[in-house]
Image (cartoon, coloured by chain):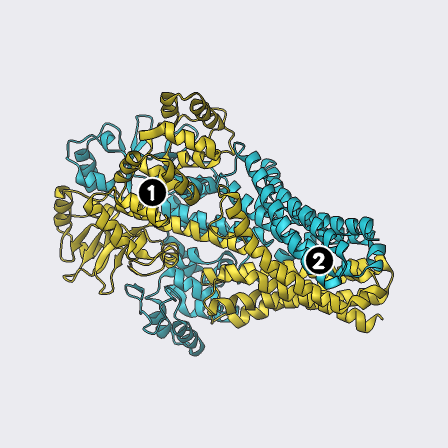
Chain colours: A cyan, B yellow
Amino acid sequence: MSETVDQTAPETEADDEYYELDQRTVAAALYAVEVGDRQRLIDLLEPLHAADIADILEQINPFDRRRLVLLYDREFDGEILSELDESIREEIIAVLKPDVLAEAVREMESDDIVDLVEDLDEPQQEAILDQLEDADRVAVEQALSYPEYSAGRLMQRETVFAPEHWTVGEAIDYLRNADELPEQFYHVILVDPKMRPIGNVTLGKIMSSRRDTALMDITEDMFQVIPVTQPESEVAYAFNQYHLISAPVVDEDDRLVGVITIDDAMIVLDEEHEEDILRLAGVSDDASLSDRIMDTVKGRATWLFVNLLTAILASLVIDLFSETIDQMVALAVLMPIVASMGGNAGTQTMTVAVRALATKDLTAQNAMRVVRREVSVGAINGLLFGFIMALVAGFWFGVPMLAVVIAVAMLLTQVAAALGGIVIPMLLDRAGIDPALASGPFVTTVTDVVGFFAFLGLAASVLL
Amino acid sequence: MSETVDQTAPETEADDEYYELDQRTVAAALYAVEVGDRQRLIDLLEPLHAADIADILEQINPFDRRRLVLLYDREFDGEILSELDESIREEIIAVLKPDVLAEAVREMESDDIVDLVEDLDEPQQEAILDQLEDADRVAVEQALSYPEYSAGRLMQRETVFAPEHWTVGEAIDYLRNADELPEQFYHVILVDPKMRPIGNVTLGKIMSSRRDTALMDITEDMFQVIPVTQPESEVAYAFNQYHLISAPVVDEDDRLVGVITIDDAMIVLDEEHEEDILRLAGVSDDASLSDRIMDTVKGRATWLFVNLLTAILASLVIDLFSETIDQMVALAVLMPIVASMGGNAGTQTMTVAVRALATKDLTAQNAMRVVRREVSVGAINGLLFGFIMALVAGFWFGVPMLAVVIAVAMLLTQVAAALGGIVIPMLLDRAGIDPALASGPFVTTVTDVVGFFAFLGLAASVLL
């Protein structure tokens, strides 16, 4: 059983359903909306985390969503906006009364506001910026001046730093007397006289060291400085690779301008993965279940259209051999097996290659060895499944030469799939194109064309 | 430019190649191994993070790997073992001299040792446990007594806690006089007299609050208690959903037994994603580029074999209509287009569904609406691509009725793909089977069978 403090933990929850929204709460909230019982709605939602309220809003239909938001009214918290899926977020901002929106946004930290407004249309963005106090507005606008998806957008501007020559005692006195410290911070950043970060000291170390200890003597082993223009995907990589907790962000003169913490990096890592998974499946990466139908159609149709072109290309190959098929219809029955097996093997290799590129495990150093390795795997699987299909085809159609033809075609297609699956992502990556997005159609084209050509071509020259 | 303190940042590094291993360092290390220059190898590797040394070991070939490890000898650090890919890790443990291995392991924290030994074979596990001091050995063995992939395996056993009635001053005095505090900690956990955790206070809040402030008054809003048997995937979900930094772990009596921090959760989240991506592509989830060839063949062949069965099933459908194809070979040319478009649409929907199930965005609450929505999307794409293919087929083969047949078959297949793509993952999930692993073959079978049946069946009844 999991439990959140303040949250009414459903008692009948099954053991394998940790953290699932209690559907009775959702139903009760919808009923409160239906009968317009504002107090009941507030009582139901108040104990929930903003992320869970956002999930409820995403799961109900647009009509109920609108009514719920209007009934909830001034209870609507800025944090709920941060947690919402982009498409739903715009819809809700349009529904919120201007004064409710203003209050919701004013409670938020400046980096959360950046995250909120950066995806909005110009007019909605302006509407929100107008609600901010001058200092916040300047902070948000400065953050927005950094490139999209850069460390500058991701960082908090509030940092806790100390001169490099300070002792533990000086740091403790400073921290205990500071007017305002950030909500969450884990390190004191040591800076040189030019404000360049040179080390991190954890609060735990400061707590447990003698007052006369120099901060420089208790810095963390692992210290990574992030340039403000660094893409956020690289930031997430660094946190994941080096197990960072927080890292100072610097401008082009190496001066401290902000700090990124692991919780921000975790969100980016999650988004990057989501994007990779969806792109590999040919779904536009901002896809979500709550998108409008026509947005979804558009997101899916683009890829399907590319697939249609490669499928037609494959059909043109088949058409070359239509006379052959006319003479032996068994070929038409068997040819999809060769192509399908090639497509699947190609997708397997391609996925492993795309992941290895993303995690920087596939490099110039091991590229040739990996290609040889994948081709060997393809050849072995080609021999294995070629042999199986030779048996199947031989017994099915009773033509020994057909068995030989399909075995050889399988082998060739599996090798081509392995080669295409590894080389195409590598070439795309080198050309600066996201291999997760673009590899699929190329790999499928290779496996389909090679599959049909090898099988039907061999059949035409050997069988007839 | 990125830089790690102590690390020789390559000056010619391109801007889009943050954190990529400098290939000259790798080449220089290999040269040092070649000529047996131990000091040079140490000088080259010493500035690197253990994760980067592990990456180098993964990227070079097994022969060089063995030589490098033997030459590096006692410099080999336990942390490198932690960072290594599982397959390479076993290989290197077998290469390391017993005394080097013993020293490497003795330096490690007990939760890192758990992570290291849990994947090892029994004899290797014993070899490592034998090197540990008694206290460590007991700690590791107790952790191993929790279920695999549970919070108990993930947690650190060292916690920092305080009675619920303490003040900030008492907490500071305790922390400053404590003999030994964990390497990394971010919260002091408040516990009741029965050792049940009831709140988290950040070190930052303790630092900046007055000595007479009650700790209970400055606890974090978000507080989540994790049961020791909770699956690690759910732990990662909770950290990601509720933006946790650390969370206490409790036994069945709700008593504090450990703590999980966000860096551990981030590693799990990363692994879960990796697993999902690879499983969706039909690659066994422990796949890596450094696996032995026969391991890879095995991992890939399982899925290819399942795919072979579904492909043969589809061919049986084609075989039903072999006479029809015999009379009109254009059908053989066009039929792969219908099946391929169905397969792709099915994969798109299935991937979105699998992700939505993983993020708990697809629930009983919105299931029916999502199904209707996906079917609508499928129908619209079916009409769109049916129309396009009708034009293509009409012009290509000059048979108007063929154009009608392919349009209708496209529509039916797209709708079936949408329905299969969403319903199959939902049913598997409800049956307790990982939808990422098992959806693919079922969805492909549906789209292939419906595609061929609709197209050839319609053709048989209308055209001939």
Image point (43%, 66%), residue name = A56
Do discs 1 and 2 share a chain? Answer: yes
**Mark count:** 2
Quarter holding the N terminus of chain B?
top left
Drawn side of residue A6 relative to residue A342, left or right: left
Drawn side of residue B196 relative to residue A142, left or right: left
Q: Earlier in the sequence, mark 1 or mark 2?
A: 1
Subunit of label 1: A
Image point (70%, 63%), residue name = B315
Please state the horizontal and vertical placement of residue B405, each as a whole percent of the image. Answer: 78, 67
Q: Which amino acid type is marked by label 1?
A: Ile
Image depth: mark 1 or mark 2 in front? 2
Q: Which amino acid type is marked by label 2?
A: Pro
Residue placed most toward the observer, B368 or A63:
B368
Dot label at residue A336: 2
Residue placed most toward the observer, A363 or A109:
A363
Image point (34%, 29%), residue name = B73
Residue that carries the numbered disc 1 in the rendered image: A245
Quarter holding the C terminus of chain B?
bottom right
**Badge 2 density bin: few <14, some 14–19, many ≥20, Cα 10 Å:** many
- Picture quarter containing residue A311? bottom right
Please state the horizontal and vertical placement of residue B300, each as a whole percent of the image. Answer: 55, 51
Residue placed most toward the observer, B236 or B151:
B151
SS of the residue under disc 1? loop
Q: Is residue A217 above or below residue A339?
A: above
SS of the residue under disc 2? helix
Residue placed most toward the observer, B354 or A30:
B354
Please state the horizontal and vertical placement of residue B124, each as a whole percent of the image. Answer: 34, 45
